[in-house]
Image (cartoon, helix red, strand yellow):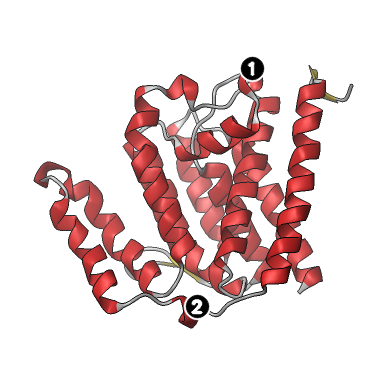
Amino acid sequence: EPRVRGYVMRNRDTKLVKDALAASAAAAAVLAALGPSTCSRARFSPSLVESCRSLRYEVPYELRHVADPFVDPLCDTLAEGHWALFLIVIANVACYLPALANSGRWSISRQSLSHERLLMYQLAHANLPHITGNMLTLLAVGSEVSGALGCNQLLLLALYLACGWAGGFAAALLSDARTVGASGSVSGVIVALSVLRPTSAVHILGDVNASNPLLLLLGTLGADLSRGGVSWQAHLGGGAAGCVLAWLLTLVG
């Protein structure tokens, strides 16, 4: 059986990889058959977007300062037709408290490797700064990635989840700790953008721009590592998957 830094990959883990590769090939065939769609075709009605913006007033006043940074970027992505980004952020926010209350059932580790956990851990976060940083970074770069993919939202969703899967698998194999969070997914999306549009400037917040997607990744990774307790293994696995998948997309495209 193959070894990874002294860790023996069990037959179950090898089967996980084979299953994931088979599922990825099937998904790629389906997405290729569906073909790309332009963002303009997916635009939502102004009334729906305004309803989205009004959600900030439904949040309890004491939590409004937490929700405010998300509302406008989130609703802007919906207005532009990037509904996959909208669903990803909503899913992460919805799962935040349940996962926080029972992190042991959401985290990924060597002992809990399964397809289910490799999905669930992406929706769990350790604390408020963790989920805020990941989701705001995703919103900053996600619309650029969506545009680079021809606004194919299913393809964007598949790319995001596949990078998260690879990040969780790497974290489980290369670390003894339990891992939660979308960092592998987000890192993969950023690296994918750097392959698809290597000279694309990324708008972050306010008037701040990163001249290259990799600069954004290095900045967010540096901020994460400075806090400690961050899984560089998940960043590495997700980033590597994003690089490979984007490269394959350039060959197909």
Horizontally, is 79 left or right of 170 in the view? left
Q: Which mark is residue 39?
A: 2
At horizontal 58% and vertical 58% (from top left) the residue drawn is 190
x, y percentage for residue 133? 40, 47
x, y percentage for residue 114? 65, 28
Let me know if residue 137 appears in the view: no
- All told, the count of numbered labels is 2
Q: Nearer the viewer, residue 250 or 52?
A: 52
Q: Which mark is residue 165?
A: none
How crowded is the residue under tag 2: few (<14 C-alpha within 10 Å), some, or many (20+)? some
Q: Nearer the viewer, residue 39 or 208?
A: 39
The secondary element bearing badge 2 is classed as: helix
Above or below for 8 versus 25: above
At horizontal 64% and vertical 17% (from top left) the residue drawn is 111
Let me know if residue 38 appears in the view: yes
* Residue that lies at the very extreme toward the right in this rendered image: 1
Q: In the image, what residue type sits under mark 2?
A: Cys
Above or below for 136 versus 197: above
Name the residue carrying label 1.
111
How crowded is the residue under tag 1: few (<14 C-alpha within 10 Å), some, or many (20+)? few
Figure quadrant of residue 53: bottom left
x, y percentage for residue 54? 18, 63
Q: Nearer the viewer, residue 25 or 194?
A: 25
Q: Nearer the viewer, residue 140 or 29?
A: 29
Which numbered disc flags the more N-terminal residue, 2 or 1?
2
Above or below for 7 versus 162: above
At horizontal 35% and vertical 42% (from top left) the residue drawn is 94
The secondary element bearing badge 1 is classed as: helix
